[in-house]
Amino acid sequence: MKKILIVEDSDMVMKILRHLVQASSLPYEAVYATSLAQASSLYSESPNDFFAALVDLNLPDAPDGEVVDFTLSKKIPSIVLTGSYDEKRREQLFNKGIVDYVTKEGRYAYSKAVAMIQRLEKNQHIKVLVVDDSDMSRKHMVNLFRRHLFQVIEAVDGVDAIKVLLENPEVKLLITDYNMPKMDGFELVRNLRYKYDKTDLIMIGVSGESSEALSAKFIKHGANDFLRKPFHPEEFYCRIIHNIESLELVEQITYNAQRDHLTGLYHRSHFFNAARELYKSAQEKSAPLVMAIINIDNFSEINQQHGNAWGDLALKQIASRLAAMLDRFLLARADSDDFFVMMPGLDHEKAAAFLSKVKQLLAAEPININGDSRHIYFSAGVTGQLKNSLDEQITTANEYLRRAKEAGGNMIVDDGDE
């Protein structure tokens, strides 16, 4: 497991940091030191295991920030805690390559420091594209991004950027210079906005030109934000993180709007919207598409024996296992203990065989319900008949499910059983 190195000589501050780190649910082990010597010793025990460091600028054996030099020399992303604000020292620290600094001004400051580590954790999974024809300028921005652990790719002009973006559709943020050959920043942003919404791809313009209207022009062309060169690293990071967090908030709202509140699976309404598109595509291409309805056998007994709260916990466990096994397909909680599965690319025989394996795996490992170990079985109706509409296909799957339940449950009925 990766580690976070926290170096602080104040007992009170260390106590606060310990509490905040424990409450943060970070996927890292925190190790604590009160001096540079102790920090060095901890590092030597596992030199390749450190994800980040949170270090006090003034320590008894390192009164002039030597601990920062130490962590940076080991290529550990470092956040600095300091008791006072000093413009010259701040500039020196950023020039050395720190992630950021936090002034010790109450509990909020320490929460902010821990939040920065959480931000670094998220940044590892975010890909950004830097577009600039100037090697020096482009490399500078690339280095700033990498300092915060973003995945970074580069392009030398607008035409190159479009090519790179098509090859890397997972890019979440693009930052582009204005004045470039072949296609300038305005043209790039304008062209990309035809395909990408502002909540799909963040685009930030940068320029060293002095025109006051430049920022307005960039934003009118579809950019989310604008930075004027030369910029301070703090301004750069504030703009980047503000836009990233806004995008994440929209993504979270969208995610929550599509999900069942109990199981976290897609809810019924989202399923129908997505399934209709799959159904339409399958009809147009004469491609196979299977609709399956799963019902948990005798689930009502759990609620009767243990109460609804335990029933809900059991349903969460079942949904989690189904999601892991059916992640290739469109899975939703339809109602109570019913689940919808849309399986493109499979005919009814292959789908039934696949679900039979899922049924076996689900039943093989019991779930714990209020101290009671219980094996879970399900019945399913499976059809690959597209018929005239999605509703008719669902009706057919539901009829097959009814037959499976009437036959005693723990079985799958498909088109071949007609």
Image (cartoon, rainbow, N blue to C red):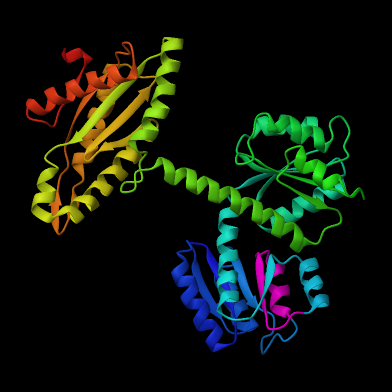
Which of these two is toward me, 30 or 185?
185
Residue 356 at x, y = what percent?
A: 22, 28
Taking the spot 29% from the left edge, 43% from the top edge, the residue there is 319
Quick one: 168 or 37, which is closer to the camera? Answer: 168
Quarter of the image holding residue 290? top left
Residue at x 11%, y 40% (from the top left corner)? 298
Residue 320 against residue 41 in the figure, above or below: above
Q: Position of residue 160 (x, y in %)?
A: 78, 32
**2 to the left or right of 89:** left
Q: Is residue 159 visible?
A: yes
Residue ID at (75%, 50%): 142
Residue at the far right: name it: 210
Which picture quadrant has residue 405? top left
Q: Which residues are magenta?
A: 65-85
Q: Is residue 209 left or right of residue 222?
A: right
Q: Is residue 115 above or below residue 189?
A: below
**Residue 268 x/y as whole percent:** 33, 35
